[in-house]
């Protein structure tokens, strides 16, 4: 293991140096990938030296998401302490499913979640979990909205026509999750936006009304704080009263920020 850590340090230091000199990785088209980079899985093993060479090549040719030349709303350089935490988590290799396997790591998760809830402005009864990404958190929000609407569905399955509402600019994972969840992609109602990509409240209310008239059951409204292309923020406060009146779940996808006016009014983040 000590040798492995030395290899890790050597490759990481080379990456840091390379990021300063060449902040943008050389582009490799997906058609040429397997010819340009040796990532084949052979039956015969390779030497440690060859493995190191292949790993360096792989690392140096991967997109350099931590440099200032990588423009994307979801990346913003490296945070030293966060990297350290991630590295130690890999070394520890706990699993969070039981206290037996995770021990004090459970405490770390609880403290972080409490802090996030406090920042949002949610009270002591709020809770959460650390999920592997936006698609999964959005899926969990859908499940919670479903159960809040009708708790029997988790035993008997989906048998009524549930609908969810999101803007046309929202992330594709909303539709994907509707398919996973069993209500179906066609039950996602895409609401118009203005020229800045912000969800239109009148159009939303009209769509919900129409669905209720036709026997559908609206279970969730999704707002996005930072849409993928335009970075738009949907109107949380104007929808709050409406959501309380209809008992429709109110969820926020927030890839950019968590602390801004109105966030405490939503049910899941
Ligand atoms: C608004 C929004 N929702 C969901 C996601 C999905 O996140 P992940 O790729 O972590 O599952 C993204 C990622 O770009 C996003 O911008």
Image (spheres, rainbow, N blue to C red):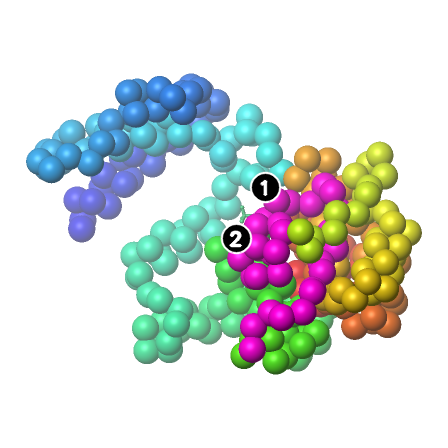
Q: Residues within 10 Å of mark 2 (few under 14, many from 20)?
A: few
**Screen quadrant of the C terminus:** bottom right
From the viewer's perspective, is 179 left or right of 210?
A: left
Q: Which mark is residue 254?
A: none
The residue under label 2 is 133
- Crowding near the residue tagged with mark 1, few <14, some 14–19, many ≥20 C-alpha atoms within 10 Å: few
The residue positioned 46% from the left and 73% from the top of the image is 107
Task: Kindly identify which residue carries mark 1.
Answer: 74
Could you say whether the residue bearing mark 1 is in a helix, strand or loop?
Answer: loop
The answer, for residue 259, to whether it is visible in the render is no
Does the residue tagged 2 have its C-beta within 8 Å of any atom of ligand 1? yes
The answer, for residue 65, to whether it is visible in the render is yes
Q: Nearer the viewer, residue 10 or 266?
A: 266
Q: Is residue 184 above or below residue 159?
A: above
- Position of 137 compared to 124: left or right? left
**Is residue 184 a member of the stretch shown in magenta?**
yes
Identify the magenta region. 156-185
- Mark 1, ligand 1, within 8 Å: the answer is yes
């Amino acid at each position: 293991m000590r040798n492995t850590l030395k290899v890790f340090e050597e490759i990481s230091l080379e990456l840091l140096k390379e990021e300063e000199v060449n902040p943008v990785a050389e582009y490799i088209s997906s058609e040429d990938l397997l010819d340009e980079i040796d990532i084949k899985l052979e039956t015969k093993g390779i030497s440690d030296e060859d493995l190191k060479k292949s790993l360096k090549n792989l690392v140096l040719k991967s997109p350099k998401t931590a440099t200032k030349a990588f423009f994307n709303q979801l990346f913003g350089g490296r945070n030293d302490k966060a990297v350290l935490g991630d590295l130690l988590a890999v070394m520890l290799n706990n699993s969070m499913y039981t206290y037996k396997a995770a021990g004090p790591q459970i405490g770390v998760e609880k403290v972080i979640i409490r802090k996030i809830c406090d920042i949002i402005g949610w009270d002591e009864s709020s809770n959460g979990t650390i999920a592997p990404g936006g698609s999964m958190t959005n899926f969990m929000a859908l499940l919670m909205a479903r159960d809040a609407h009708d708790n029997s569905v988790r035993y008997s399955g989906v048998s009524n026509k549930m609908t969810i509402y999101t803007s046309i600019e929202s992330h594709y994972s909303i539709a994907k999750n509707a398919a996973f969840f069993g209500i179906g992609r066609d039950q996602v109602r895409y609401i118009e936006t203005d020229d800045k990509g912000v969800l239109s409240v009148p159009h939303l209310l009209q769509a919900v009304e129409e669905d209720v008239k036709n026997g559908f059951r609206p279970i969730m409204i999704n707002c996005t704080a930072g849409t993928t292309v335009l970075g738009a923020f949907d109107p949380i406060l104007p929808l709050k009263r409406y959501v309380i009146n209809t008992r429709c779940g109110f969820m926020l996808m927030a890839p950019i920020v968590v602390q801004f006016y109105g966030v405490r009014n939503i049910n899941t983040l």
